[in-house]
Image (cartoon, rainbow, N blue to C red):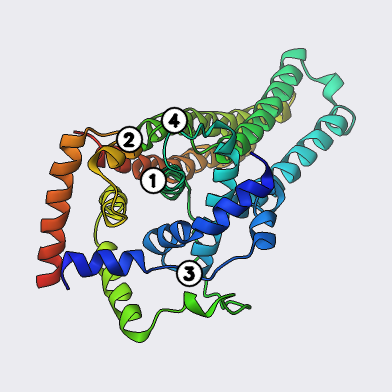
Amino acid sequence: MELDQFKSAWQGMGGEHKNTAALKKMLSENKHPVLKGIRLQMIIEITAWTFFLFVYYDMFDGDRRPFYVNALLVAAVILLVMHSVMGYLSAKNIVNGNDLKQSLLNYLSKVKIYALVSVVSRVCVVICVLVFFIATIHFTPAKYLLLAGILLIIPLQVFLLVRIWGSRIKKIRAAINGLEE
Amino acid sequence: MSEKQFLTLIDQHQGIIHKICRLYRDTTEDREDLFQEIIFQLWQSFPAFEGKSKITSWMYRIALNTALASFRKKIPAIAYTATLPDYAEDLPNEQQAMQQEKLLEVLKKLDDTEKAIIALYFEEMSYAEIAAITGISENYVGVKLNRIKNNIQKLLKI
């Protein structure tokens, strides 16, 4: 096949025609395939953490722990909630410029910041929850061992998050590189 | 412009979105998701569209931007469409279908930005229009297109 034939094949290409009623449904944020999933995750996370904030003080003896421990825990949860909202807004606003290259550059900056917040907030929450629960514990060798085991979760979580975000950033960067002169 | 006018415009030019979906996604489900996502992004960007460029150029820019920036679901899925196409004209004849498959087979071997540039070229856009959409200079559009055409020729010989 020659390029001219390719050109005419491209121009004749289409897909299953959608009527305006079907198109109208797609304008709604609630029908968005990616946002729907993120929103559900965000609602579950925010509800769970808000519930935790309401009950932790009584259920886990917040009053018997130092003030800074309580403050750290609340701050970490707020950071996590902010991270969820930020993620939702970032996925909603993909187009960020007047041309493809500029838009992708702006989007890459946003994704990099979001990836950093994502890793930091997850680590902060794990550390703050741990600090909260171990603040008044009298340690024995067995408990130290248990703590070491729990601490292993942090690098594992960081590794998984960095891998996910790394591949997303790589994909956007590859597209930008393809537009570099 | 109103929602109704927007929908009329999209209805008229939805072929552009279908082409981008077929170019950048392999499964029916992924294409449906991308189609929906592009419509949503077009609607979000519509208030900022000043009419300085052609509506088709604007649609291509937003559609390509969405295809390049959106993250795909990890799980591969086989999906069967529940509906038949609204219009019989949407179905290409056998020869057209074969040409389109061959075209997509070759285009899918290009990288994401090469796909974008050649798609705009196939759409008969001028170098100036391609430059305005992609954000690269007109000269570089020429350089890139030559490389892509050579690349396609090589791929056809394999």
Q: In the rendered image of this protein, does residue B87 appear above or below residue A86?
A: below
Tag 3 secondary structure: loop
Callout 1 and callout 4 share a chain: yes
Task: Give the residue type that dot 3 points to.
Answer: Gly
Task: Give the residue type that dot 1 points to.
Answer: Ser
- Mark 3 vs mark 4, foreground winner is 3
Is the Cβ of the residue at disc 2 closer than 8 Å to that at disc 4? Answer: no
Callout 3 and callout 1 share a chain: yes
- Mark 3, residues whose alpha carbon is within 10 Å: few (<14), some, or many (≥20)? some
Q: Residue at x 18, y 64 (%)?
A: A3
Task: Give the residue type that dot 2 points to.
Answer: Ala
Mark 3 vs mark 1, CA separation in Å: 30 Å
State the residue position of label 1: A167
Callout 2 and callout 4 share a chain: no
Residue A97, label in figure: 4
Mark 2 vs mark 4, CA separation in Å: 12 Å
- Mark 1 vs mark 2, foreground winner is 2
- Mark 1 vs mark 4, foreground winner is 4
